Image: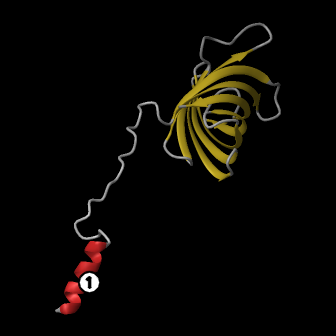
Amino acid sequence: MKKTYLVLALLSSLNVVGAEVKTESPAPASFLDGIYIEALGVMRKPNITGKSEYGAGAEIGKAFNSKVAVGIQNIAYKTPDNWEGGAIDETSGVAHWTLFSNKKTSLGGLGSVTHSWREDAWALGAGAEIKHYFTKNVSAGIGAQIRFWNSGTAKEDLLVSGSVGYKF
């Protein structure tokens, strides 16, 4: 019995028994946390070895954590005479995942499902990308993917893109 009182006295002197545990609540999450936007410059090579087509576009998406992000990408292509069909030639749903990273640079994979508005065709794509973060929010990257089309003039193509982005 004396040992029990001794333990209780020791614990209360250490302010463990009945002590309030003070925890700080994390800052409230912002709606914009993890949202990113990227400006794209692209080069497309139909049938992998065909004549290059150049274009520009944008991607907006959401990073779920430091390893996985998904986005929507819109691209318009330029031909020697003019810009193709309309404001948007292709729309893609893109998934990005990081395989290796250090504090500033990451190497990862990407996958996409693309719809071509000018050929009314669908494609599945897979590739790789490297991204460098100049600050916590500002990045630049380059990626390449091979896409396989269900119809249209090219059965496959190579899409190479460069990007400059901002993550909230």
Residue 54 in view, yes or no? yes
User: Which residue occupies the foreground of this view, 47 or 28?
Assistant: 28
The relative height of residue 71 versus residue 20 in the rendered view (above or below) is above
Give the colouring mode of the picture.
Answer: secondary structure
Q: Please report the residue visible at 59 percent of the width from the left and 17 percent of the height from the top.
A: 88
The residue tagged 1 is 7
Q: Is residue 8 above or below residue 75?
A: below
Work out whether residue 60 or residue 160 is closer to the camera in this orientation and state it. Answer: 60
In the structure shown, which secondary structural element does the residue marked by tag 1 occupy?
Answer: helix
User: Is the residue marked by circle 1 packed among few (<14), some (14-19), or many (20+) residues within 10 Å?
Assistant: few
Residue 2: image location, x then y, percent: 19, 91
Q: Position of residue 75 (x, y in %)?
A: 63, 22
Q: Is residue 107 above or below residue 46?
A: below
What percent of the width, then of the height, locates residue 105? 71, 45
Residue 14, quarter of picture? bottom left
Q: Amino acid at mark 1?
A: Val
The N terminus - image quarter: bottom left
Residue 73 visible in image: no
Q: Residue furthest top?
A: 81
Q: Is residue 134 left or right of residue 51?
A: left
- Does residue 126 sit above or below 165 in this rendering? below
Left or right, 8 with reference to 159: left
Query: Residue at 64% of width from left, 29% of height from top?
Result: 165
Quadrant housing residue 74: top right
Of residues 11 and 141, which is closer to you in this image? 11
